[in-house]
Image: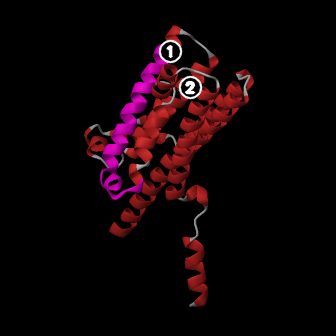
Amino acid sequence: MEKEKMQKKEAEIVEWYDNPNFITTLSIIALLLIIILSQSFAVKNNIGSNAILRNLLNHNSIYLVGLLYFIPLKTKVGKKYFDFLNLFLILIYTIFTVTSVLTIIQSLSLISLVTLGIYVMFLIYMIHSLLCNTRIWKEFRLDKSPFNDIGNLNYFYTIVILGLVLLTINLIQTSTFDGAVISMLVTVYIVLLSRYIYLYKDYVSRKKNQSKKGNK
Protein backbone atom coordinates (compact mmCIF):
# COMPACT_ATOMS: atom_id res chain seq x y z
CA MET A 1 0.00 0.00 0.00
CA GLU A 2 2.81 2.40 0.88
CA LYS A 3 4.53 1.70 -2.45
CA GLU A 4 1.29 2.43 -4.30
CA LYS A 5 0.87 5.73 -2.43
CA MET A 6 4.45 6.69 -3.24
CA GLN A 7 3.89 5.89 -6.90
CA LYS A 8 0.71 8.01 -6.95
CA LYS A 9 2.52 10.94 -5.33
CA GLU A 10 5.34 10.67 -7.87
CA ALA A 11 2.79 10.59 -10.70
CA GLU A 12 1.12 13.75 -9.30
CA ILE A 13 4.43 15.68 -9.30
CA VAL A 14 4.52 17.74 -12.48
CA GLU A 15 7.54 19.60 -13.79
CA TRP A 16 7.06 23.37 -14.14
CA TYR A 17 7.21 23.18 -17.94
CA ASP A 18 4.36 20.64 -17.93
CA ASN A 19 2.16 22.73 -15.61
CA PRO A 20 -0.27 24.82 -17.71
CA ASN A 21 -1.20 27.02 -14.74
CA PHE A 22 2.45 27.89 -14.12
CA ILE A 23 3.08 28.46 -17.83
CA THR A 24 0.10 30.83 -17.90
CA THR A 25 1.48 32.76 -14.91
CA LEU A 26 4.95 33.01 -16.49
CA SER A 27 3.38 34.20 -19.76
CA ILE A 28 1.55 37.01 -17.96
CA ILE A 29 4.77 38.05 -16.17
CA ALA A 30 6.75 38.00 -19.44
CA LEU A 31 4.09 40.06 -21.23
CA LEU A 32 3.96 42.65 -18.44
CA LEU A 33 7.76 42.94 -18.46
CA ILE A 34 7.85 43.40 -22.25
CA ILE A 35 5.23 46.16 -22.17
CA ILE A 36 6.51 47.95 -19.07
CA LEU A 37 10.20 47.82 -20.02
CA SER A 38 9.61 48.87 -23.63
CA GLN A 39 7.59 51.87 -22.42
CA SER A 40 10.12 52.75 -19.72
CA PHE A 41 12.94 52.55 -22.28
CA ALA A 42 10.96 54.88 -24.53
CA VAL A 43 10.52 57.36 -21.67
CA LYS A 44 14.24 57.13 -20.79
CA ASN A 45 15.12 57.97 -24.40
CA ASN A 46 12.99 61.12 -24.15
CA ILE A 47 10.44 59.96 -26.71
CA GLY A 48 7.29 62.08 -26.77
CA SER A 49 4.00 60.96 -25.24
CA ASN A 50 2.36 60.57 -28.65
CA ALA A 51 5.21 58.33 -29.86
CA ILE A 52 4.99 56.27 -26.66
CA LEU A 53 1.26 55.76 -27.19
CA ARG A 54 1.82 54.73 -30.83
CA ASN A 55 4.54 52.32 -29.70
CA LEU A 56 2.14 50.80 -27.18
CA LEU A 57 -0.66 50.37 -29.73
CA ASN A 58 1.53 49.24 -32.65
CA HIS A 59 4.64 47.41 -31.46
CA ASN A 60 3.14 46.13 -28.19
CA SER A 61 -0.37 45.39 -29.45
CA ILE A 62 0.34 41.65 -29.85
CA TYR A 63 1.50 41.55 -26.22
CA LEU A 64 -1.56 43.47 -25.02
CA VAL A 65 -3.65 40.84 -26.80
CA GLY A 66 -1.66 38.17 -24.95
CA LEU A 67 -2.60 39.75 -21.63
CA LEU A 68 -6.25 39.95 -22.69
CA TYR A 69 -6.07 36.21 -23.38
CA PHE A 70 -4.08 34.88 -20.43
CA ILE A 71 -5.37 37.03 -17.57
CA PRO A 72 -9.03 35.91 -17.99
CA LEU A 73 -7.86 32.29 -17.89
CA LYS A 74 -7.07 32.88 -14.21
CA THR A 75 -10.76 33.59 -13.55
CA LYS A 76 -13.88 31.44 -13.59
CA VAL A 77 -15.42 33.57 -16.34
CA GLY A 78 -12.37 33.09 -18.55
CA LYS A 79 -12.41 29.33 -18.04
CA LYS A 80 -16.12 29.27 -18.84
CA TYR A 81 -15.59 31.09 -22.13
CA PHE A 82 -12.31 29.36 -22.94
CA ASP A 83 -13.33 28.54 -26.53
CA PHE A 84 -14.27 32.16 -27.23
CA LEU A 85 -10.92 33.34 -25.92
CA ASN A 86 -9.23 30.87 -28.27
CA LEU A 87 -11.22 32.19 -31.23
CA PHE A 88 -10.25 35.73 -30.23
CA LEU A 89 -6.55 34.78 -30.13
CA ILE A 90 -6.72 32.98 -33.48
CA LEU A 91 -8.48 35.96 -35.08
CA ILE A 92 -5.81 38.36 -33.82
CA TYR A 93 -2.98 36.13 -35.06
CA THR A 94 -4.72 35.91 -38.43
CA ILE A 95 -4.69 39.71 -38.64
CA PHE A 96 -1.02 39.89 -37.64
CA THR A 97 -0.12 37.19 -40.17
CA VAL A 98 -1.76 39.18 -42.97
CA THR A 99 -0.01 42.34 -41.71
CA SER A 100 3.34 40.50 -41.79
CA VAL A 101 2.74 39.50 -45.41
CA LEU A 102 2.06 43.15 -46.31
CA THR A 103 5.21 44.18 -44.43
CA ILE A 104 7.30 41.76 -46.51
CA ILE A 105 5.78 43.13 -49.71
CA GLN A 106 6.71 46.67 -48.68
CA SER A 107 10.18 45.94 -47.28
CA LEU A 108 11.70 42.48 -47.47
CA SER A 109 14.12 41.62 -44.67
CA LEU A 110 15.32 38.56 -42.78
CA ILE A 111 13.55 39.67 -39.60
CA SER A 112 10.23 40.15 -41.41
CA LEU A 113 10.54 36.69 -43.02
CA VAL A 114 11.27 34.93 -39.72
CA THR A 115 8.49 36.91 -37.99
CA LEU A 116 6.05 35.84 -40.70
CA GLY A 117 7.17 32.23 -40.24
CA ILE A 118 6.46 32.45 -36.50
CA TYR A 119 3.01 33.97 -37.04
CA VAL A 120 2.09 31.36 -39.67
CA MET A 121 3.27 28.47 -37.48
CA PHE A 122 1.41 29.86 -34.47
CA LEU A 123 -1.76 30.33 -36.52
CA ILE A 124 -1.70 26.76 -37.88
CA TYR A 125 -0.77 25.38 -34.46
CA MET A 126 -3.60 27.26 -32.71
CA ILE A 127 -6.23 26.23 -35.24
CA HIS A 128 -5.24 22.57 -35.04
CA SER A 129 -4.91 22.54 -31.25
CA LEU A 130 -7.22 25.07 -29.61
CA LEU A 131 -10.24 24.32 -31.82
CA CYS A 132 -10.26 20.55 -31.28
CA ASN A 133 -13.31 20.58 -28.98
CA THR A 134 -15.38 23.16 -30.83
CA ARG A 135 -18.13 23.08 -33.45
CA ILE A 136 -15.79 24.80 -35.90
CA TRP A 137 -13.57 21.71 -35.85
CA LYS A 138 -16.48 19.48 -36.88
CA GLU A 139 -18.19 21.88 -39.29
CA PHE A 140 -15.02 22.61 -41.26
CA ARG A 141 -13.84 18.98 -40.96
CA LEU A 142 -10.46 20.04 -39.65
CA ASP A 143 -9.80 16.46 -38.58
CA LYS A 144 -9.04 15.79 -42.28
CA SER A 145 -6.51 18.64 -42.52
CA PRO A 146 -3.04 17.53 -43.66
CA PHE A 147 -1.53 19.67 -40.88
CA ASN A 148 -2.81 17.12 -38.37
CA ASP A 149 -0.07 14.80 -39.61
CA ILE A 150 2.51 17.10 -38.05
CA GLY A 151 3.24 15.96 -34.51
CA ASN A 152 2.56 18.15 -31.50
CA LEU A 153 6.22 18.11 -30.49
CA ASN A 154 7.29 19.03 -34.05
CA TYR A 155 5.11 22.14 -33.98
CA PHE A 156 6.56 23.12 -30.60
CA TYR A 157 10.19 22.65 -31.62
CA THR A 158 9.70 24.46 -34.95
CA ILE A 159 8.34 27.56 -33.23
CA VAL A 160 11.06 27.45 -30.57
CA ILE A 161 13.77 27.23 -33.25
CA LEU A 162 12.23 30.11 -35.22
CA GLY A 163 12.07 32.13 -32.01
CA LEU A 164 15.76 31.50 -31.32
CA VAL A 165 16.63 32.45 -34.92
CA LEU A 166 14.70 35.70 -34.50
CA LEU A 167 16.50 36.36 -31.20
CA THR A 168 19.90 35.78 -32.83
CA ILE A 169 19.12 38.21 -35.66
CA ASN A 170 17.82 40.85 -33.24
CA LEU A 171 20.87 40.54 -30.98
CA ILE A 172 23.19 40.92 -33.98
CA GLN A 173 21.37 43.97 -35.30
CA THR A 174 20.62 45.75 -32.03
CA SER A 175 23.12 48.26 -30.74
CA THR A 176 21.54 48.92 -27.33
CA PHE A 177 21.19 46.97 -24.10
CA ASP A 178 17.49 47.87 -23.99
CA GLY A 179 16.87 46.24 -27.35
CA ALA A 180 18.69 43.07 -26.29
CA VAL A 181 16.60 42.76 -23.12
CA ILE A 182 13.30 43.21 -25.00
CA SER A 183 14.39 40.70 -27.67
CA MET A 184 15.16 38.06 -25.04
CA LEU A 185 11.83 38.62 -23.27
CA VAL A 186 9.96 38.34 -26.58
CA THR A 187 11.68 35.00 -27.25
CA VAL A 188 10.75 33.80 -23.75
CA TYR A 189 7.10 34.66 -24.46
CA ILE A 190 7.20 32.87 -27.83
CA VAL A 191 8.49 29.71 -26.11
CA LEU A 192 5.91 29.97 -23.30
CA LEU A 193 2.99 30.47 -25.70
CA SER A 194 4.05 27.53 -27.85
CA ARG A 195 4.48 25.39 -24.69
CA TYR A 196 0.99 26.38 -23.54
CA ILE A 197 -0.52 25.27 -26.85
CA TYR A 198 1.55 22.08 -26.73
CA LEU A 199 0.20 21.20 -23.27
CA TYR A 200 -3.40 21.79 -24.32
CA LYS A 201 -2.99 19.66 -27.45
CA ASP A 202 -1.36 16.94 -25.35
CA TYR A 203 -4.23 17.09 -22.84
CA VAL A 204 -6.86 16.75 -25.58
CA SER A 205 -5.00 13.81 -27.16
CA ARG A 206 -4.68 11.96 -23.84
CA LYS A 207 -8.34 12.57 -23.07
CA LYS A 208 -9.38 11.11 -26.44
CA ASN A 209 -7.18 8.05 -25.93
CA GLN A 210 -8.68 7.47 -22.47
CA SER A 211 -12.24 7.71 -23.82
CA LYS A 212 -11.40 5.21 -26.57
CA LYS A 213 -10.01 2.77 -24.03
CA GLY A 214 -13.11 3.27 -21.88
CA ASN A 215 -15.40 2.51 -24.83
CA LYS A 216 -13.48 -0.66 -25.61
Q: Which quadrant is the N terminus positioned in?
A: bottom right
Q: Nearer the viewer, residue 148 or 97?
A: 97
How packed mark 2 is, by other alpha carbons closer than 10 Å (few <14, some 14-19, many 20 or more), is: many
Mark 1 lies on residue? 103
Mark 2 lies on residue? 115
| Observer able to see residue 22 | yes
Label 2 is placed on what type of residue?
Answer: Thr
**Can you give x and y, in whole percent of width and height, for residue 65 in the image?**
43, 37
Q: Which residues are magenta?
A: 74-103
In the image, what residue occupies the spot 71% across and 23% down?
A: 174
Question: Is the residue 18 above or below the residue 150 in the image?
Answer: below
**Residue 70 got which mark?**
none
Q: Is residue 127 left or right of residue 23?
A: left
Tell whether label 2 touches label 1 (CB within 8 Å): yes
Q: Is residue 206 left or right of residue 91?
A: right
Label 1 is placed on what type of residue?
Answer: Thr
Q: Is residue 152 left or right of residue 74?
A: right
Q: Which quadrant is the C terminus positioned in?
A: bottom left
In the image, what residue occupies the spot 58% across and 70% down?
A: 13
Could you say whether the residue bearing mark 2 is in a helix, strand or loop?
Answer: helix
